[in-house]
Amino acid sequence: MTSQGSAPRGGWVERHILGSGGFGTVTLWENQESDERIALKRCRLQNEMNAKHRQRWEQEITIMKRLDHPNVIAVRDVPPPLDVGKDSLPLLAMEYCSGGDLRKVLNRPEHCCGLPELQVRFLARDVARAIEYLHGKRIIHRDLKPENIVLQNIEDRIVYKLIDLGYAKELDQGSVCTSFVGTLQYLAPELFASQKYTCTVDYWSFGTVVFECITGIRPFLPSMAPVLWHREVCQKKVDDICAILDSTGKVRFSQKLPTPNHLCRTLQVYFEQWLRMMLYWDPKARGGGIDPDQRRPNCFVLLDNLLEMKIVHVLNVSANQMMSYPVVEKQTLQELQRILSEETKIPVEEQEILLASGITPDPEKPAAQCWSKPGEEDWIVFLFRKSTSVINNNDKQAKPIPLMVQNIIREPNTLLPYQEQRRAWAESVCFCQEQVTDLKTLILAQRAAILDVLRVNTKFLQKKTEMMQDIGQLQAKGDFFRMSLQHDIQRYNDQAASGGITSSSMYAKWKKMGEDLKQIKELSWRMTELDEQARALQTKIVELHKSPFAKSKQTDVLEELTTKAEKLYQDLRLATKEQRRTLSDHSPMVNVVHKCVLVRHKAMADLYTHLGKASSCKAEIKKLLPDISAGCDEIKQSIERLTTNQKQRQNDLWYLVKKALSGVNNQSGASVLRQELKGDISNLPPQSAVSDSSSSGLESLKIIEDNKQTQAHLSNLFDNVLHEHDSFVSSLHDMTWDFLGPSSGDTK
């Protein structure tokens, strides 16, 4: 069933009326077989138009068919079943844009104080390209207004397109004025006054549309009657971009964009500069002339530069202050930090900057690494102060309540004229929206802080694990060394007591080695204490994940309150003229704003508490990590010292053997020593080989007997020493140490 009940025509069905203007009505038609949809416009004044006007209408359609630009509505062929006869004015078939027109978008309650920054960017760029294209074709639109800008969703992005191109430009001035009834606020002053004009009339209209998209209201006295409006606005100074009536009824001009709006402060400054150029009262100065290098109007050059500018958004977390800065390709991160220091009073060395991913920017890379392509959610950089382990909730700045909202909160029963009440309620809606945005941004800050803690904690845990593995290695090797040392000292004492070889310096060194083992015990105790502190810290870090702000949907209550505020505003906007004459109080809106403030206050307090916990955890990691790193170094040094002591003790044992054998050499000669080293004790030299002297037989027998006894004693001692040493060395080198795990200081 169609909206007008018309029957299908050749498979085409009329769906509903899309809109109507001064000359025509646009209707949506859909093909039942192909699902193709077109917007069909027919002239509704054809019975009132003479032959000259009819000729100009047909000529305009011919021109439209020659235009081809992505930001200008595309013309389609009229389907034969829908076409009209030769005696009727021709129809205009156009592509169907499902997003509706810009006026419907601006009328949504969530846009009562302007569009989001991203949509302002897209709209300004798309419409500027369309206007520059038309002017290049020597076409002046003359009727730029939100109703003549439509939206089409292409590849997940809204594209803005111009419609109703120049239908009135060839008509007489009387018809022009008739066609603009109700949209005079978008007319350039010279067009309104029926003066000669150029393409700069489109600049004024374009600037007015962009201003309304930024703020939600038109720039100059939007509620004033046209004739009075012209008389007042013509008094504006060159750089004035808006005018309002104050509480006394006096006109106040301004060179600044009114607040609240949704632009970052950097874009506000540059758009103010651009709007001054577009809203010059003098048509010759409007647009800024022609750029000599690019040979394009300066207004389009400036807008391109503005929209291509890279803007970094930085949240000073402790102050809850959002800042924005334009950055250039060669600007260093250190230069950006110096700018931050000037504004926040946080010294560069105290700044801790985190990207949304929780990663710290690379100081060797330019500041542009903190920028991302504009999207629905800009990539925000978060600024923390290093020395603050706990964020002071009292330092944060509460977002100021707009003045008009303060007035209705202070006196909710004070009755205001409709336009003032509507603006006060619009600012109330925007205030509620800002609370949602602020809370979401701080939640992102907490998420970045937690990710940063987890990243740092990963390295911390690796170092702590290394410490515990190494201390385990040290303890095991120390225990083995202690047992073997005790055994060696015991055997040394035993052989010394039986008249064996002794060395006071060697014995003192061994005793000193035993004293050194006490340091291993003390080191082990300190590492255990560090491990306990690290375990307690891990418990705190796990608790961070249990934060309610670590989960999604933590702004539900504020979003519900914002929705209520938007509905109240929409009901007020849609009130009939009779209802508008009846003044009403502000209690419903004030109640919503009051609840919003209370919810925000509690949520912010809780959020800053959790931010403080994350900051405290990171501070503890930074405090413990140097101690653990130093502990790892001490463990490695202790292992090296233990290994050195072991080698020294082995050298001492061999020195003892050498000393014992040296005594044998002095008494029995080199040949006896060589035989003893070979272990061939049974093949002793004959008596004649011992002495060839002619001494008496009794003396010779005594020497031989002494030699036999000394040889037997040393042989016994040597065998015992070699046996014990070989056993110890064999057990030390052949023992499997795998159960201790790899030592971080070992190399293969």
Image (cartoon, grey):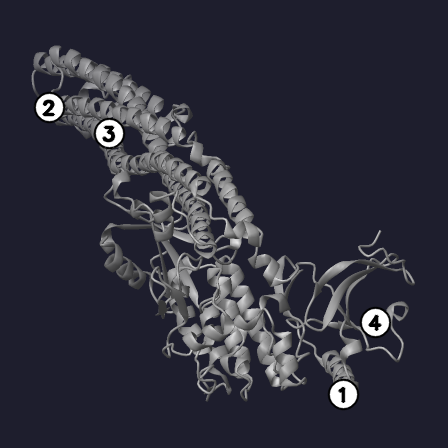
Which residue is label 3 attached to?
642
Residue 366 in the image, given as x and y percentages of width and height: 37, 63
Taking the image as shown, residue 694 lies to the left or right of residue 137, namely left
Taking the image as shown, residue 263 lies to the left or right of residue 463, namely right
Which residue is label 1 attached to?
52
Mark 1 neighbour density, 10 Å: few (under 14) some (14–19) many (20 or more)? few
Examine the rendering and report whether any part of residue 744 can be seen: no
Residue 716 in the image, given as x and y percentages of width and height: 23, 14
Tell me how far mark 1 sits from mark 4, CA to CA: 23 Å
Q: Which of marks 2 and 4 is nearer the N terminus?
A: 4
Q: Which of marks 4 and 3 is nearer the N terminus?
A: 4
User: Callout 2: helix, strand or loop?
Assistant: helix
Mark 2 neighbour density, 10 Å: few (under 14) some (14–19) many (20 or more)? few
Q: Identity of the amino acid at label 2?
A: Ala
* Label number found at residue 525: none
Mark 2 touching mark 1, by CB under 8 A?
A: no
Mark 3 touching mark 1, by CB under 8 A?
A: no
* Label number found at residue 508: 2
